[in-house]
Amino acid sequence: MKKEGFYSSGEFAHMAKVTVRTIRYYDSHDVLKPSFVSESGARFYTDEDFARLQQILLLKFLGFSLNDIKNMTIGDTDYHFMLDSLEVQLKLVRDKIEQLQLVETAIEDTSYEIKEHHAVNWEKMLNLIHLTGMEKAVKKQYQNATNISSRIRLHRLYSKNKKGWFPWIFDQLNLKDGMKVLEIGCGNGMLWEENDYQIPRKIMINLSDVSEGMLRDARRNVGSEDKRFKFEIVDAENIPYEAETFDVIIANHMLFYCENLKKTCSEIARVLKKTGMFVCSTYGKNHMKEVSDLVRGFDNRIVLSADELYEKFGKENGEKVLKPYFKSIDWKEYSDWLEIQEGEPLIAYILSCHGNQNQYILNRYNEFRDYVKEKVKKIFFVTKEAGIFVCKK
């Protein structure tokens, strides 16, 4: 007997405009399981399942394999997850459009060369091969954007400091007309998007990142038509500028990712003016410690970060790292904490971390969700210990 609020496999497939065979295929590959299976083996689906199917079909349309899709989606349709997913999928669609436009141009140019000159321009052909092989980069960008979105959302929802992180950082920069600014590892450009109305009109700002995908997001968020901004891929260990070029250099939560931190700091000091200022953010060993304790309480094998990034460059050792390159180094702490009252945004944050958590959580996801929701029935307090080093030569 059919349960109220449930759709049979046939009804569900009809709603989605796919075949029943497709629905069964997703079921057999553990990509989309039915919400209810009767004693006779009949499978039934809900509106929540339909929302998950929407994600699956879009990612499949964009060229992702079933294994990719399985790793990109989880069985939860809370609005926090859905909003994060839709926002990131919109970015992914835009990336795909840009990619296909580049491929279109490369094909047209190559065809023209063959028609007009009866020869192949091998350089353009190699560019075409490169462009059509961008899928891995797009997939990685999807994962990065999803993770960043989940982390930002948790802080926006539950941070107690009414002045957000990016406005606070911006206030420390003291930017003025005529300055030249470099941000290393700009990510999606959130620092500038959130403070757009305060940015001086006559200023030059170079936004750099090692990820072309992140730069695309920054261009969209900041606005590629804004002549104050220049966007470029830059390796922080080899900054392509002359000595003493910039008045202000910013590295927001990125120094602990650098493979050769000494080389990076040396390069930053080299391109910073003698009267300039270097602002770099990091966090301390107590940052978000309650979240780590929470997941270890569920399974003590879980480590949310494969590397303790603060051990490479953190509040406790940052001054020692920076001292060979700067005479004046001051630590300014951002006073804040979280009071979390819902489970889903916290779960999304946990799943976004760079550790081994998915290995132990995804197969027990419903159990983990219930565990977290029980923990946040009362307000769940989380320590934040982050700030900036303000450095001068």
Image: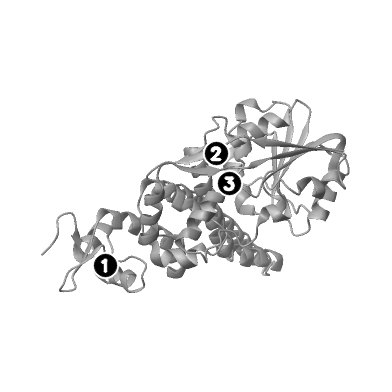
Distance from disc 2 to disc 3, alpha carbons, whole Å, reads 28 Å
Spot occupied by residue 84 in the image (x, y as percentages of width and height): 45, 48
Give the residue at the far left of this rendering: 1
Asked which secondary structure carries label 3, the reply is helix
Q: Does residue 96 show up?
A: no
For the residues carrying marks 1 and 3, which lies nearer the camera in this image?
Answer: 3
Q: In which quarter of the image is the C terminus?
A: top right
Q: In which quarter of the image is the N terminus?
A: bottom left
Spot occupied by residue 179 in the image (x, y as percentages of width and height): 78, 30
The colouring scheme, among rainbow, by chain, secondary structure or one colour, is one colour
Q: How crowded is mark 3: few (under 14 residues within 10 Å), some or many (20 or more)?
A: many
Distance from disc 1 to disc 2, alpha carbons, whole Å, reads 49 Å
User: What label does residue 217 carry, if any?
Assistant: 3
Q: How crowded is mark 2: few (under 14 residues within 10 Å), some or many (20 or more)?
A: some
Amino acid identity at mark 3:
Asp
Query: Observer-nearest residue: 181 or 312?
Result: 312
Q: How crowded is mark 1: few (under 14 residues within 10 Å), some or many (20 or more)?
A: some
> In percent of the image, x 65 and y 50: which residue is there?
285
Amino acid identity at mark 2:
Trp
User: What label does residue 337 carry, if any?
Assistant: 2
Could you tell which of marks 2 and 3 lies nearer the N-terminus?
Answer: 3
Query: Observer-nearest residue: 347 or 317?
Result: 317
The residue under label 1 is 19
**Position of 340 relative to 29 (above/below):** above
Pointer 1 with pointer 3, Cβ within 8 A:
no
- Residue 107, image quadrant: bottom right
Asked which secondary structure carries label 2, the reply is strand
Asked which secondary structure carries label 1, the reply is loop
